[in-house]
Amino acid sequence: VQPGLWGLVLAAAGGVALAVWSVVWRRRRRGVEPGDRSAASEVLNSPFLPGSGRARQERRWFFLTLQVKSSGQQVLLLGLEGSGKSSLLQCFTAGGLEYDVSPTQGFSAVSVHREEVHVEFLEIGGAEHLRLYWDMYLSRAAVLVYVVDSSDRARLPLARRLLHRLLRPEPRLPLVVLANKQDLPGACSVTDLHEALSLSDLGDQRKMFLIGTHLKKTGAQLDAGLQDARDLILQMVAAVREDQERGHETKACSFL
Ligand SMILES: Nc1nc2c(ncn2[C@@H]2O[C@H](COP(=O)(O)OP(=O)(O)OP(=O)(O)O)[C@@H](O)[C@H]2O)c(=O)[nH]1
Ligand SMILES: [Mg+2]
């Protein structure tokens, strides 16, 4: 796939604290419209997010505004911090790792247009204080991409627990598990990771794929494994969309 076929909008990255803070206060004074994604982005990337009381409520509300007006099909990227979500997003959209990523402080969103499909990749940071927001986006997601650092064996049980808890209320949500960092010494093989994450216990109604990936800093060309992963995700999104359209048609027919 030529990178030229991809349109992308990088909608969130970092944020200069003081500037963001002043924007937050300006918006607080004038009020923020539901669905104002730029506001949510600015706030969530602010390192000034306090963790309790009213401020926490407001933070939750800002997260919620993100849900209201998002268009296209959403692919949710989750996984523990440092597993490689932002790096993968960069590779999927820019075709390679062109710049260093820093830990995601809130969320980061990238829109991809390909042929008729408009897909929005949404990563929520994996740090502990951000994990409580993960499930807020599940019902909106067409596909969940769960990224695991295969070399971080000590935290595989935690990655498994979080994944299982997350998917309990979503028995049909399609899942792609990316066993990332396969290049690192001591990385868990894809087969062992299947076992360690108890993927066979995640329900037989679910479309599920497990793919080994590793990211290289060199070259603008997307690695074949990553290309396969990206194409698979887009195909799954297209399939979900077709199902939804068929569902709408069936509903429309039943009214006739
Ligand atoms: N060796 C190796 N390093 C990787 C790979 N993928 C990502 N990394 C590195 O892992 C580190 C963390 O990557 P991120 O993409 O920031 O991880 P993240 O999941 O987005 O982390 P949070 O935003 O904190 O949730 C970075 O230094 C990446 O360069 C990989 O396949 N192999
Ligand atoms: Mg990140």
Image (spheres, grey):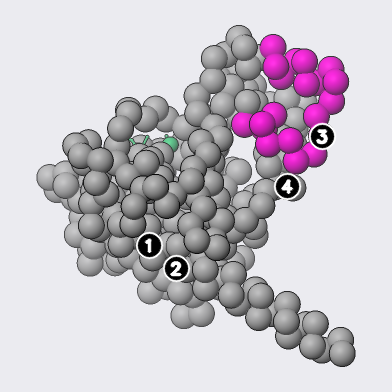
Residue under label 3, please give it.
33
Residue 169: x and y in percent read: 61, 65
Decide which of tag 1 and tag 3 comes sooner along the chain.
Answer: 3
33 in the magenta segment? yes
Identity of the residue furthest to the top in this view: 18
Quadrant position of the C terminus in the picture: bottom right
Q: Which residues are magenta?
A: 22-41
Residue under label 2, please give it.
235
Residue 128: x and y in percent read: 49, 37
Q: The disc labelled 1 sits on which kind of residue?
A: Asp
- The image quadrant of residue 25 is top right
Q: Which mark is residue 231?
A: 1
The residue located at (37%, 41%) in the rendering is 94
Q: Is the residue 124 above or below the residue 150 in the image?
A: above
Q: Is the residue 49 above or below the residue 127 in the image?
A: above
The residue located at (30%, 62%) in the rendering is 228
Decide which of tag 3 and tag 4 comes sooner along the chain.
Answer: 3
Residue under label 4, please give it.
69
Contact (Cβ within 8 Å) of mark 4 with mark 1? no
Q: The disc labelled 4 sits on which kind of residue?
A: Lys
The residue located at (75%, 30%) in the rendering is 58
Disc 4 from disc 2: Cα separation: 24 Å
Left or right, residue 170 beside residue 190 = right
Left or right, residue 74 beside residue 178 = right
Disc 2 from disc 1: Cα separation: 6 Å
